[in-house]
Image (tube, helix red, strand yellow):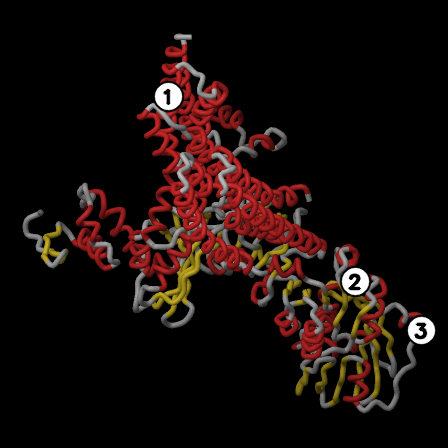
Amino acid sequence: MDILFFLIPIAVLLACVIVGVFFWAVRSGQFEDLEGPAYRILRDDDSNSLNRRIEQERQD
Amino acid sequence: MPSGVEITTTIFDQPRPMCCAGCRAVAETIIASGHSDFYRHRTELSRTANTLVPEFLVDNRVFDNPSLQRRFVDELDDSIVETMLSIDGITCSACGWLIEQQLSKMPGVSFASLNFATHLLHVKWHKYQSKLSTIIDQLASIGFDAVPFQANEQAARLQKQYAVSLRRLVVAGIFGMQAMMLAVAMYLADGAMDARYETLFRWTSLALCIPILLYSAAPFFRAAANQIAARYPGMDTPVSVGIGLAFSASVWHTWQGSGDVYFDSVAMFTFLLLLARHIELVTRRKSQTGLLNPTGSVPEVASRREDTDAGGSSWQSVPVFELCVGDHVRVLRGQAVPCDGVLINASTCVDEALLTGESNPVVRSGGETLLAGSVIVGETAQIKVSAELKDSYLSQLQRLLARAQNEKPPAVQLADRVAGKFVFAVLLIGAAVALYWLHSGSNDWLAICIATLIVTCPCALSLATPTVMAAANGALSNSGVLPTRSRTVETLARATHVVFDKTGTLTSNELQLEHIELFNNCSRDEALNVAAALEQHALHPVARTLQSLACKQIAATNIAVKNTGVRGEIHGETWCVGSPDFVASNAGLSWVPGSSNSLSELGTTKVLLARSGVVVARFYFSQKLRQGSEALIAALVHSGKQVSILSGDCAEAVAPVAAELKIKSWQSNLAPRDKQSEITLLQSHGAVVAMIGDGSNDSLSLAAADVSIAVGSGTDIVRISADAILTGDSLKNVILAFSLSDQARCIIRQNIAWAIAYNTLALPLAAAGFVAPWMAAIGMSLSSLLVVVNSTRLLRVNRWS
């Protein structure tokens, strides 16, 4: 069972990594709107969509 | 110290040099508020001018600039001004108490009221005795950041709070899970674990708990410190004492290598409590949609026509608040109208859902007014600004709504008072329990004390009502019934009687001319023209219809407008137009035509026109029921409310409407004062009366009722003092208002009943030592969580309908 002395610190380290990744996700705005994206794909009018913008930029 | 600067402040009877006016102001604030001990006990030097002054003082002075203040400060009279401040750092109702107390002590501040749900502070102060910057400084000195409420800042602030709250929650969650995993192993082993593993587990748990305590639980400790400094413990105080005690005891036992550790309880308690607060924050954020949504209702920038020197013109982007009356503004398809304005081009199609709750676009033709916040869905519109954004219909609605959100409803006031006293009791009981068990020689005295403190914290009690109220007001305003008072939701739910006005409320304001009977050689055109000339100053719906039917303008003199008719002179002859009774008594009729039976049965309004005492024409007007009135009456009757009509119209006009809507109780021929006394009579029999009326001539009865909804068309409706305003046309929305209020009341009752039942049950169990700290943590947090989740049901109801 001495493996625990190795595994538990690794678990703690992993938790720290997870928290770090989560902080990054919050900062990059991924949690700002949790409902909008679900409806956005249903909208016919996609003039604001990312694809359209990318297309326009390419044409420019 | 910089050379050449001689600024000093007296601290502990000794003049001390200061580097700048900013630092002096900080020092003086601290001394003046009796916190000079800060200088005796501080262990680190305070921040100096480089970082402190720009944030803390210079920025605030900007708010005293009159041209900037125009954007968010309203003048009530010559000297009193008011504004809304958005406050950061509020965690519970005690913070609100502290802020209100601190401000009301300030000279020149006449009113301060904080809303827990929106974190908006409503202050009124004497312009010459105090300054806005002083008020903001005062708030900063007790630990709260305040910014004048500007729509976008509130949203940005909420966004920041949300992100911080989410981070704290997840830190507590992830490290908490690890700590719990280790705790489960220790519980299962029940002391039979090998000593080296137990030491490993304990120290690991300790390490995992440090970020939870320092980062996730920080807001509890900060709030508790403020509360203790103000000598007014709020619900953060027992929470902090509980967490602090549990953690210190665990650290000590870990160091000693013996005794119980409660790291899992600390982690779980923090996580669940943060979860409850996070859900409360999300609820508040979600209810900020539609009119309440400070962003997105109007654009920041408008396209204004600027005439160039060469005689041409170009479109320039300018900030919306710079637009003045008379400017030409262009609004492209898909954009929102930035301020109220008259449409210049032929026609366009607009979506006014935000303002009226009506989802179908409407067509507006040239000369009509487009309202700020409506979205152009037709052709690009050009408008001539008729009101600045600050004075627009949208802003007026938003101000009314802000007032409703900012007042403390009676239910919240009660909850605040009860919770405040309860915290005192919890702290005393915690101490007494600890002393008792210590005295009786128990080893568990600390665990029992921690459990008691945690289990009885009245968080559920003070969280419950504000969340429901914020959600209810938000849902109401989205459904087209705009609450203007905080008591609206509560009182609508209690209403036993619903009293309607008829004309303009149950029936639409427009009357239709069905038929004209002519007598004594009068022509149809002459009858209409004369009637319109007489009615030109009257406001009755009959008058409005007649005015629109005239084909030629005639001058009338000596016009006397009465409630039921008008008398005047045209070309030396006396004319009367009005109800048959009015004409009979005012014109001295010698002959009245017999009524034609087929028409009188239709429930039409009859209007006579008489020339020099001779009837020359009889108009038949029919009335149309307002959209949704049948459904509303049916729903009200179904929910057991007494429905009645109080109308100023004649019985023949009221009876058919009452019959069609199946309303048994109706009265006709009532003057505004009679309606008022009818309502007072109902109230004296114990009824709670909701009055739904046309604002223009029912203001007396609207004021007399316990709760009132003003119905009308057009933008004048914001000037009526009713408790709620129907912003759309259809009465169907009122059904939703009643059912939402019922639901809100029901949820508040459930919440309070639960909070009280839980506390009365948990307190004796914990004091008697039956509750371990981990059970207390689960019990208390789940109780808060239950209450908050229960409140969010109101948001879901709204989305489904």
Q: Nearer the viewer, residue B316 or B437?
A: B437
Same chain check for tags 3 and 1: yes
Q: Amino acid at mark 3?
A: Asn
What residue do we see at 64% from left, 45% from top? B798
A30 in relation to B562, above or below = above
Residue that lies at the very extreme toward the left in this rendered image = B3
Q: Earlier in the sequence, mark 3 or mark 1?
A: 1
Label 3, on which residue?
A: B597
Q: Nearer the viewer, residue B419 or B297?
A: B419
Tell me the SS state at disc 1.
helix
Label 2, on which residue?
A: B624
Q: Amino acid at mark 1?
A: Thr
Which of the two marks, 2 or 1, is nearer to us in this view?
1
The percent position of residue B610, horizontal first and vertical second, equals: 80, 84
Q: Earlier in the sequence, mark 2 or mark 3?
A: 3
Please say whether residue B432 is visible from this viewpoint. Answer: yes
Cβ–Cβ below 8 Å for labels 3 and 1? no
Report which quarter residue B601 is drawn in: bottom right
- Dot label at residue B204: 1
Position of B10 compared to B681: left or right? Answer: left
Q: Nearer the viewer, residue B315 or B39?
A: B39
